[in-house]
């Protein structure tokens, strides 16, 4: 639309981690998109894993999966949910991947005769990864640098940003630095010194921050803003406050009020002609904050100690809940605690159960007990991935009386492997990036519950699993009312199951939560919440 060169925005963080760079980046992306720019957001992660696929969710929260099957940082989920546009494997790069590429090139002989070094080889590869997105059709690339300035592992990234800023020039790039203003309750003051230090550290690395976004628990008064501007070398209007909000979805509006998007567009020399249209966003917020109903749903999983482990699921509940003007109250239930003698106490107050995805056998039997309780007491239940697999196990054991039925993930000797490994998975030895990943087509049976929910027969959803429903059991499942209603058209793999004669009993092998956004809440979550509130 603008016929200009691609503009680059770098978001760095100072003072502490967990300040919400992902949310600030996603908010800025939304504001710029709403003004007509084609924007994408990228995350650079300074750890050595090739991707977060092999990490326990307790390390970094949920592993988010893109359409093209990349296992990525959970911030990519925020980018998609805010912007309502898809990311890809190019949107998340780790130090591991950077080094892997450089070392592969070295083995190939690409650098013959040369010493391979952090500067220029690693920094060149970082710059290449940033600019790859610029080759696509974007006006603006926002690159979030993981970690905090000053971290040893962030240094090559900071150097790459310095070089890129120099190469691109001031009009084509902007550096936004996110910092924290701690509040000292004894003196009743917000303190600026840590921010001054982190900006100074950036300067020592050759980077001048153009915009400061300051996280604070209290409003930042003009005096403090002036001080920050003066000591951090930025314009007064480029000091942006980012207070704690009731919900992350208010952040874009709070930033907009202070002209955050104007400041960025001015710095990049981009037109401010088109004003932002955030009507739908505000409508969503209004509904989210003024629900007319409430439902209580239990999320049954084993990583409930860190709710970030199920980020996309809890956000999908927010999107669908707002759509229905319904508050979704989630109780986080550790599946390892659920036993036959306490199951009715645990779920006595809840109106619906979500059986979460997961790996490994801890807490598995608790999930089976919870599923049996929901099936027999006709409580709406939605099982996702491992959740769906355990629904199949429970049904085999308790309805088909197949004693010892299990997934071969947990019992390789089970007499009834209702969940098993496909032939091609049996040969897989490497753990990283080898599951069934990314978008797969699925055809829904005409007249099935799921076909009604989606309103169409042909769908595509994202996957992340190694094990599959064993089609040998299809007929006996069907005979007892459990319908395998969704199939992959190419492989025949069973992607969904649903139980007849139950108010809502649906298991899906895929992860619907990855595709729920503010602008487009997922129909499966909407229908589930609706079923719960009707019950
Ligand atoms: N552990 C199961 C599998 O690999 C389920 C994975 C998941 O829930 N994402 O098939």
Image (tube, rainbow, N blue to C red):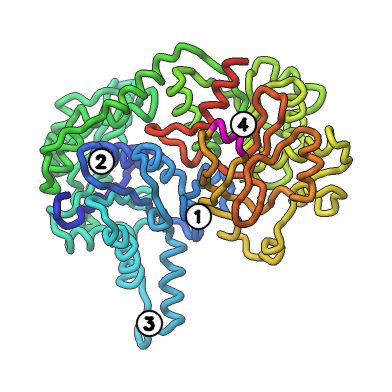
Crowding at mark 4 (Cα within 10 Å: few <14, some 14-19, many 20+): many
Residue 69 disc label: 1
Q: Nearer the viewer, mark 1 or mark 4?
A: 4
Secondary structure beneath label 1: loop
Single out the residue that lies furthest toward the front: 446
Single out the residue that lies furthest toward the bottom: 113
Front position in the image: 131 or 508? 508
Q: Nearer the viewer, mark 2 or mark 3?
A: 2
| Residue indicated by mark 4 | 449
With 486 as the anchor, is 179 left or right in this view? left
Q: Nearer the viewer, mark 4 or mark 2?
A: 4
Q: Upstream in the sequence, badge 1 or badge 3?
A: 1
With 405 as the anchor, is 380 left or right in this view? left
The residues bearing labels 1 and 4 have C-alpha atoms spaced at a distance of 27 Å
Where 91 sits versus 290, above or below?
Answer: below
| Residue indicated by mark 2 | 33
Q: Upstream in the sequence, badge 4 or badge 3?
A: 3
Secondary structure beneath label 3: loop
Q: Upstream in the sequence, badge 4 or badge 2?
A: 2
| Residue indicated by mark 3 | 110
With 486 as the anchor, is 515 left or right in this view? left
With 162 as the anchor, is 342 left or right in this view? right
Question: Could you tell me which residue is drawn at 50 percent across and 28 percent down?
Answer: 317
The answer to the question of whether label 1 and label 4 lie on touching residues, with beta carbons closer than 8 A, is no
Q: Inspect the magenta stretch and tell me whether residue 147 lies in it.
A: no
Q: Upstream in the sequence, badge 1 or badge 4?
A: 1
Q: Quadrant of residue 195?
A: top left
The residues bearing labels 4 and 2 have C-alpha atoms spaced at a distance of 36 Å
Point out the stretch of residues depicted in magenta: 446-453
Q: Main secondary structure of the magenta part?
A: helix
The residues bearing labels 2 and 3 have C-alpha atoms spaced at a distance of 39 Å
Q: Please tell me how many numbered marks the rendered image carries.
A: 4
């Amino acid at each position: 639309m603008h016929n200009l060169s691609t503009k680059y925005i770098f978001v760095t963080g100072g003072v502490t981690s967990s300040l919400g760079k992902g949310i600030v980046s996603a908010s800025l992306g939304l504001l710029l998109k709403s003004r007509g720019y084609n924007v994408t957001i990228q995350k650079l992660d300074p750890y050595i894993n090739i991707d977060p696929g092999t990490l326990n969710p307790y390390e970094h929260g949920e592993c988010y999966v893109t359409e093209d099957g990349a296992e990525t940082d959970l911030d990519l989920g925020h980018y998609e949910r805010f912007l309502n546009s898809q990311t890809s494997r190019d949107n998340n790069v780790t130090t591991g991947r950077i080094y892997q590429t450089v070392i592969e090139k070295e083995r190939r002989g690409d650098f013959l005769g040369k010493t391979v070094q952090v500067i220029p080889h690693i920094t060149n590869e970082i710059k290449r990864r940033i600019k790859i997105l610029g080759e696509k059709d974007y006006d603006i690339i926002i690159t979030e640098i993981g970690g905090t300035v000053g971290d040893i592992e962030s240094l090559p990234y900071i150097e790459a940003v310095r070089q890129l800023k120099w190469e691109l020039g001031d009009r084509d790039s902007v550096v936004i630095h996110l910092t924290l203003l701690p509040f000292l309750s004894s003196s009743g003051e917000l303190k600026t010194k840590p921010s001054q230090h982190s900006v100074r550290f950036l300067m020592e690395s050759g980077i001048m921050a153009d915009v400061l976004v300051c996280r604070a628990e209290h409003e930042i008064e003009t005096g403090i803003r002036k001080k920050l501007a003066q000591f951090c070398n930025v314009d007064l209007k480029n000091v942006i406050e980012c207070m704690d909000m009731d919900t992350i979805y208010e952040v874009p509006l709070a930033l907009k009020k202070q002209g955050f998007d104007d400041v960025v567009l001015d710095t990049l020399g981009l037109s401010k002609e088109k004003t932002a249209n955030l009507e739908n966003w505000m409508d969503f917020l209004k509904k989210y904050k003024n629900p007319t109903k409430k439902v209580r749903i239990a999320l049954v999983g084993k990583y409930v100690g860190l709710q970030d482990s199920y980020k996309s699921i809890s956000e999908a509940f927010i999107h669908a809940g707002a759509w229905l003007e319904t508050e979704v109250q989630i109780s986080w239930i550790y599946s390892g605690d659920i036993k036959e003698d306490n199951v009715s106490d645990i779920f006595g107050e809840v109106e619906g159960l979500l059986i979460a995805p997961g790996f490994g056998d801890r807490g598995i039997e608790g999930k089976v007990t919870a599923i049996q309780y929901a099936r027999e007491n006709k409580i709406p239940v939605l099982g996702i991935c491992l959740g769906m697999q355990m629904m199949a196990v429970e049904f085999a054991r308790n309805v088909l009386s197949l004693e010892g039925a299990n997934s071969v993930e947990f019992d390789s000797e089970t007499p009834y492997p209702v969940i098993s490994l496909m032939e091609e998975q049996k040969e897989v030895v490497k753990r990283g990036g080898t599951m069934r990943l990314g978008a797969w087509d699925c055809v829904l049976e005409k007249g099935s519950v799921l076909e009604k929910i989606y309103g169409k027969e042909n769908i595509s959803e994202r996957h992340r699993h190694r094990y599959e429903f064993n089609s040998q059991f299809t007929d006996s499942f069907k005979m007892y009312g459990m319908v395998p209603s969704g199939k992959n058209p190419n492989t025949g793999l069973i992607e969904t199951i649903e139980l007849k004669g139950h108010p809502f009993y649906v298991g899906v092998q895929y992860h619907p939560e990855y595709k729920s956004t503010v602008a487009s809440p997922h129909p499966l979550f909407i229908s589930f919440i609706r079923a719960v509130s009707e019950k």
